[in-house]
Image (cartoon, rainbow, N blue to C red):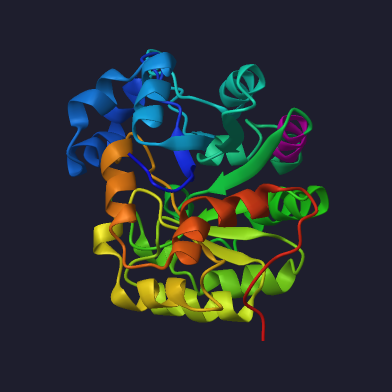
Amino acid sequence: MAQHRVFDGWVNLNTPEFAGVFTVDIYDEVSSFFSRPEQMQAGTALPEMIKEMRAAGIERAVLTAYGVEYPDLPDVRCVQGEDVVKVVTERPELFTASAGFNSPRAIGGHGGGITAGVRRLATLIDQGLRVFRIVPFNFDRPPTDACFYPYYSLCEQTGTIASVNVGVPGPKGAAWTQDPLHLDRVLRDFPDLTVIASHTGHPWEEMLIRLMMKYENLYLMTTAYSARYLKPELVSFMRSRRGRTKVMFASGWPLLGFGRAVGDALRLDLPDEAMDGYLYANLDRVLRPGEPAAGGGM
């Protein structure tokens, strides 16, 4: 389908063994919010998912473990970073590893304290993890909360990217925790940390644009947000000299189907250089260890 190279910045590992997460708690609400609840709740075998990626023209993807946990529901197996690392080790030409610890139990080291959680993340990074994801509404805490700071510090030291969800969440979590203005504090406290603001940040896109102009190491990923709904101000920024290196495509699969996500992105009114950056080059550059940031800054 695609006429440009495509690097999908957020693909959830949702094989049948892990799909039960979309049947419980707020994630049942998430699956009903999108148009494919049956597929989300049933899961998709990895070979079939790869086939769908290829049909949409997706060349590479950041494979993600969302990292929630339901210890009181032993029949619901939630995908974890260790599961993703195993898949990526087998298909390194196709996938880059990403994971979050998006439950208070996980971020707290499963009773061993935050230091134990940080040690777990360090092990995953040693095994090839490149992106650590934080979803603030899962904790009812903002990205500036002290529980996240040791994780930011490790990411900064190791060159691991921190992905932080921004914008009003679809589930009925606390929206204030995902106001992108919180990232101003994080980026001042960790000046060498690369941060990707994920999930588009609606309705605060203008704030994100201003922050990306301020911080050369801040980027935006339009995860699970169809490009047809991007605000004109954001699309205009993507066309600009400062903005064409700053925004990244992501389907958030299975939240959006690959074909729909790529097709809507290709219909954006962007010149070729900006489209290439959005669909592939911006993420590819940021994921390369030691690569300097591009764009932004005062």
At 44% across and 74% down in the image, what residue appears?
A: 239
Q: Give the side of residue 106 with respect to residue 230, left or right.
A: right
Q: Give the side of residue 188 with respect to residue 106, left or right.
A: right
Q: Nearer the viewer, residue 81 or 28?
A: 81
Query: Which quarter of the figure is the C terminus placed in?
Result: bottom right
Question: In the rendered image, which quarter is residue 53 located in?
Answer: top left
Image coordinates of residue 146 in percent, x first then y, are 65, 59
Query: Which quarter of the figure is the N terminus placed in?
Result: top left
Q: Main secondary structure of the magenta part?
A: helix
At 72% across and 32% down in the image, what residue appears?
A: 128
Q: Give the side of residue 289 with respect to residue 130, left or right.
A: right
Q: Is residue 206 above or below residue 28?
A: below
Q: Is residue 221 above or below residue 240?
A: above
Q: Nearer the viewer, residue 2 or 80?
A: 2
Residue with the most extreme bottom position: 298
Q: Is residue 146 above or below residue 85?
A: below
Q: Give the side of residue 236 with respect to residue 143, left or right.
A: left
Question: In the rendered image, which quarter is residue 124 located in?
Answer: top right
Image coordinates of residue 196 in percent, x first then y, are 56, 58
Image coordinates of residue 110 in percent, x first then y, are 62, 30
| Residue 158 visible, this orientation | yes
Q: Nearer the viewer, residue 99 or 277?
A: 277
At 35% across and 22% down in the image, what residue appears?
A: 19
Q: Is residue 194 above or below residue 62?
A: below
At 48% across and 78% down in the image, what residue appears?
A: 240
The question of residue 83 being in magenta is answered with no
The segment highlighted magenta reads 117-125
